[in-house]
Amino acid sequence: MVVVSRTNGDTARARIAIAGDDAAVATMEDFVRRFCAERALGEAMTARLAVVLEELLTNSIKYAFTDAARHDVHIALEADGGRVIAVYEDDGVPFDPFAVAAPNFETPVEEWPIGRLGVHLIRHLTDRVSYERTAGATASR
């Protein structure tokens, strides 16, 4: 699970299941925009949530869904007491993105291993993140 917590908003919840396919990113972005707009969370919060969830979703599609089967991603958002919490779940190959070390910024970007910059962005744009594997699903909070 990945927890995205940021300041803003009143208690409210929304959930979506998205097919892990080429249309997934646009669907997720629309969901985030509507959630944030309905709660007047502002452009900065909307952008943070969209970038974090896009990184997770793109990684799932590219690396976690290794077979031809349909895979769904579940996203839950909650605005409560000045925070937004996002829970992201997929049924792909287990991978803890937060166990990956941050990139070495002294090394040329061409030499960085794949995946580190996106994880770095997620860490930078959130207050707290966590990962959990339960019942065949990877969950980021």
Image (spheres, rainbow, N blue to C red):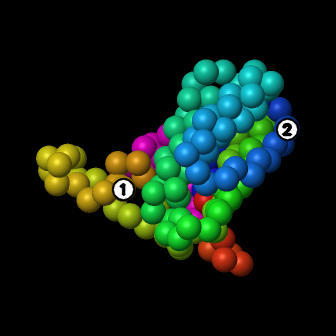
Amino acid type, label 1:
Gly
Location of residue 32 in the rendering, given as x and y in whole percent from the top left corner: 68, 34
Q: Quadrant of the C terminus?
A: bottom right
Q: Is residue 134 left or right of residue 129?
A: right
**Residue at which label 2 appears:** 12
Q: Secondary structure at mark 1?
A: loop
Q: Is residue 103 left or right of residue 30?
A: left
The residue located at (28%, 53%) in the rendering is 103
* Vertical order, 66 against 123 (above or below): below
* Vertical order, 51 against 132 (above or below): above
The residue located at (62%, 68%) in the rendering is 69
Q: Quadrant of the N terminus?
A: bottom right
Asked whether 123 falls inside the magenta stretch, the response is: yes
**Residue at which label 1 appears:** 115
Q: Which residues are magenta?
A: 120-131
Task: Give the mark nearer the N terminus: 2 vs 1.
Answer: 2
Asked whether 8 falls inside the magenta stretch, the response is: no
Q: Would you call the spot at circle 2 few (<14 residues within 10 Å), some (14-19), or many (20 or more)?
A: some
2 and 1 marks in contact (CB < 8 Å): no
The residue located at (45%, 57%) in the rendering is 62
Task: Give the alpha-carbon distance from disc 2 to disc 1, as whole Å.
Answer: 32 Å
- Corner quadrant of residue 130: bottom right
Residue placed furthest toward the front: 68
